[in-house]
Amino acid sequence: MIRFEGVTKRYADASGADDGAGSLAVDDLTLEAPTGKITVLVGPSGCGKTTTLRMVNRMITPTSGTISIDGKDTASLDVAELRRGIGYVIQHAGLFPHRTVLDNVTTVPRLLGTDKRTARARAMELIERVGLDPAMARRYPAQLSGGQQQRVGVARALAADPPVMLMDEPFSAVDPVVREQLQNEFLRLQSELGKTILFVTHDIDEAVKLGDQVAVLRVGGVLAQLDSPAKLLADPVDDFVAGFVGRDRGYRALSFAAAPELSLTDEPTVRLGARADDVRAVGTPWVLCVDDDREPLGWVRAAAVETEVTRTLLHRGGTVASVSGSLRALLDAALSSPSGRGVVAGDDGRLVGTIRAAEVIPAIEARRDSTTEEATAR
């Protein structure tokens, strides 16, 4: 557990005088990051997110207040000892360019006295665990993509098996597709490892996806609200928080509502190579194409098929929802589909059926009524 109690960070003014007139980066911050959970710090630029993070490992010294880890005041600990128990991941990975991936990951264990063979074995295990091909262990950082470098950065932070991890916008420097992959991999790792994580981001969607709890900070380092993502979206404490989490927060809140058992439509399908006459015989403007395992490949516009269905004709804009997913995923699948019919797959990835937005809305309304009744009863 990481606990901040009345923590303030004030920087000296331009003259260098530390007389209380300098800029306030963090103001009387009190919050608790529970053991084994992800606490996300989010807020606009200049709200003190990174300053707060860096005060934990004493890269920045608080002006006042205390920060403790599992009940121990960090100010009373030897700095080197403190940092050995904390993994640190930054935006651009910060890898040593002259060292291979394997040697980057073994850096901290070797410094702590772990023998070379044991450190390398652990490093190879972590390289695979973060989703990298073991063959990449011999490469240098310059030979990796941005996403691969970030994975190495996470592996290096985990190498000494620290109980606490600090992550400062670790996925913000990569493209959206890679970012989502890294987020999913990160959540998978956390489900296995259960680290106490303090995570900084400026992206509210990332905060809501990753955080067990989210701390929204105002400019000047003032805590505006600390809550679970669902509570934050459903009940922002004031106009600042409401504005920051976004005007579409009601839609995003559906991510926390499990999809109920809804009646799905049996969708006729075609395979790659299907002839134009067979596609048009389905009788709908858009026809769903699946592979031999009945996993959805995309929609094809019947009028566009001159001879047969090819991959170049597939429309992949529509998302695929899971039967065990959320109401948001169901609604998004329906809204993003060119046919207006959202594709729903089982946990094995195979097509189960389709659903329209008009069929999801009643389930959303039923959830709203149920939530209102529970709140009234309390």
Image (cartoon, rainbow, N blue to C red):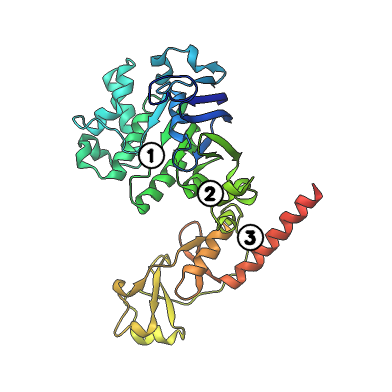
* Badge 1 amino acid: Pro
Q: Nearer the viewer, mark 2 or mark 1?
A: 2
Which residue is at a point 32% across and 78% down the rendered structure image? 309
Which residue is at a point 31% across and 38% down the rendered structure image? 92
Q: Which residue is mark 2?
A: 244
Taking 98 as reference, is 184 left or right? right
Q: Which residue is mark 3?
A: 260
Q: Which residue is mark 1?
A: 170
Q: Nearer the viewer, residue 297 or 240?
A: 240
Q: Mark 2 to mark 3: distance in Å?
A: 30 Å
| Secondary structure at numbered mark 3 | loop
Which callout, 2 or 3, points at the residue further toward the start of the chain?
Answer: 2
Q: Nearer the viewer, mark 1 or mark 3?
A: 1
Instruction: Using the rendered view, name the quadrant where residue 315 is placed.
Output: bottom left
Q: Nearer the viewer, residue 60 or 282?
A: 60
Taking 87 as reference, is 205 left or right? right
Q: Nearer the viewer, residue 27 or 313?
A: 27
| Secondary structure at numbered mark 2 | helix
- The residue sitting at the front extreme is 15
* Badge 2 amino acid: Phe
Give the crowd class for mark 3: few <14, some 14-19, many >=20 residues within 10 Å: some
Q: Is 242 above or below relative to 8?
A: below
* Badge 3 amino acid: Pro
Which residue is at a point 32% across and 22% down the rendered structure image? 108
Q: Position of residue 240 (x, y in %)?
A: 57, 47
| Secondary structure at numbered mark 1 | loop
Which callout, 1 or 3, points at the residue further toward the start of the chain?
Answer: 1
Q: Mark 1 to mark 3: distance in Å?
A: 34 Å
